[in-house]
Image (cartoon, rainbow, N blue to C red):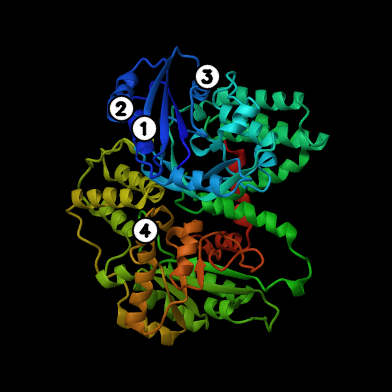
Amino acid sequence: MQSLVSIIIPCFNTEKYIGEAIDSVLNQTYKNIEVLVVNDGSTDHSEEIIKSYLEKDKRVKYIFQDNNGVSSARNKGLENADGEIISFLDADDIWEKNNLEEKVGFIQSDPSTHWVFSDCYLADERMNKLRISESGNDENVFDSLITRSGDVIHAPSNVVVKKECILLNKIRFDTRLSTSADWDFCIQLALHGFIGKRIPKPLWSYRLLPESMSRNIHRMEHDNLMIYKKYADKKIFHSFWFRLKCLSNNYFILGGCWWVDGKNKTRGLYFILKSVLIYPPNILKILSKISPYYLTTPGDNEYPSPIQRETLIRLRKKKKQLVSSHAQISEPINIFLFHRINPQADPLWNPVHPKSFEKILLYLKNKFEVILLEEFLLHPYSTANKKPFCAITFDDGYRDYLEYALPLLTKYKCPASMYIVTECINQNLPPWTYQMNHSFINTSFLSLDLDTTSFPEKLKKTKWSHKAERLAYAKELSPFLKSIPDYQRRRIYNEIKNQFHDAEPPKGLMLNWKEINELWHNNTTIGSHSSTHPVLSQIMDNAELFSELQSSADEIEKHTGKIPISVAYPFGLYNTNTKDLTAKSGYKFAVTTVPYPYSNPLFDSFEIPRLELFDESLLKSKLRINGIAPKIAKFRNLLSP
């Protein structure tokens, strides 16, 4: 007999979402449940929606209380819960169908485990999944919680806990808290020695809402500092320095929230300085948080890749662990990325001019030993002339490689790797980003009929007075489309292409299979750049993601007789799932756009870094190649108002 599980859903004026939340519970594969919906004095139509479920399913129970806050509502649910196992769900979140089955099964299979949590999907207001957020570690849950290290694991919608743990120690949600009451609840569980375990897969979806409590930074500031004082008074910190570290981390998080979400850099800097003053080692946190500016490139916007930020932070941690002996560290290699070499300027995405490309090649030849990336990866390499190594790569498969890049590469005896988008080769059309830019450049229309509800504010206006405004919009739109789920991106892109129907498709820009075969004989190896050039980390269906990777490799083998050993992630964006399926697709290596030299102790073979070079002065290219430009960029961003 399955244990009865009580699910507590607090509700206050969430008529837009409460039905979806309840449905996600009733549709669970685990059936022995009761659903306690606690209406915390809602003044909208929430009550009517909740009561409609009482007739549909006897497992749903309705509890009303005068408005007293979310913590009080959860406690009210606890008082009325009959289940041996307790779970919570916020009214604007939803569960995957197997959420309870996985979590309850985990608890029941391991008597030493008292509560469990999992990874989650971050979703937009319409519950379109944006990306996966990995939960914190479970090696020392208490320290992880109290020091605020790792990702958030304490959202109520995430936790499934044995009821006896709550009853024996009278654990409740602190009614003085709102935004951080969930954090405090989990600290209480860990403080009493109850073992929490992580399930490393996304089993629920967290809806990102601008008006949600987590965005109420004033309240968050109050709650977080109250929690710190609460546990400082209980003297639970291991040592004086551990206590300072916890407070410092708290200040640091508040500083980041004010700086980024609150758009208040003055208050953000105030908390960041307090963080460093009371615990100076946290200056390293500032450096690691600045690290996303290493990703700054011409045309980039405010939609950076979370996994790239995580990678850069992780690298700094790994660097500390490396042994200084050169003999024990693999030879590093700098890998440089280009796309197009062409003298014709483009108003939205300028190719590197052949004259600039030649100057860069001369500089690389003088500074590095230029070798094939595949040879470096497959065979132990040692330099003969004491120069550091570098490799040159190209993405997409544009035909101008033959006319402008290959002659110069041949002239200076530089090998290169080309990563091709196989459907672009088959259709003789460039990737969707180029096609979309081409439409914006060549259409005569000055408006689009799009549903921009979920768009950032600056992208909601789709009517322009002249072409320059339309092109400015296109520059902002492209990074946004890379940040949303792929199925959404495809829908929006297709609408744009259909409405800008007067722009002829940009045919004839891509290599064909005959030319690609000839490249093998001209010191250019071929790798995969996916089948259709999506953002792989934004594909939620594993079968679809696997197909993107596998079908591209199959096409290359079919037309060249050679199996590609490496893949370049489109836009350099990836996550853990992408890496896993890349390995299962048969590839041995994968390259990104994380701009660091590649050294095996730092990176694994499915996140090999590359640094992209652009059409700019040789001085700027040199600064980029030598890692100086990113440092300038990060300090410029720090000093910006």
The residue tagged with tag 3: helix, strand or loop? helix
Q: Nearer the viewer, mark 3 or mark 2?
A: 2
Could you tell me how far apart the alpha carbons at marks 3 and 1 are, in whole angstroms? 20 Å
In the picture as drawn, the residue positioned furthest to the top comes out as: 66
Q: Quadrant of residue 186?
A: top right
Seen at 62% across and 65% down, the residue is: 597
Numbered disc in front, either 1 or 4: 1
Please identify the quarter of the rendering in which residue 511 is found: bottom left
Number of the front mark, 3 or 4:
3
Question: In the picture shown, does residue 481 fall above or below 456?
Answer: below
Mark 2 or 4, which is nearer the eye? 2
How crowded pointer 4 is (Cα within 10 Å; few <14, some 14-19, many 20+) is rated as many
Circle 2 sits in a helix, a strand or a loop, which is it?
helix
Mark 2 residue type: Tyr
Residue 341 appears in view: no
User: Is residue 563 something that shows in the picture?
Assistant: yes
Callout 4: helix, strand or loop? loop
Nearest to N terminus: mark 1 or mark 4 = 1
Cα distance in 3D space between marks 3 and 2: 23 Å
Give the residue at the far left of this rendering: 502
Q: Amino acid at mark 3?
A: Ser
The residue to which callout 3 is attached is 72
The first of marks 2 and 4 along the sequence is 2
Residue 328 horizontal/vertical position (percent): 75, 72
Is disc 2 in contact with disc 4, using a CB cutoff of under 8 Å? no
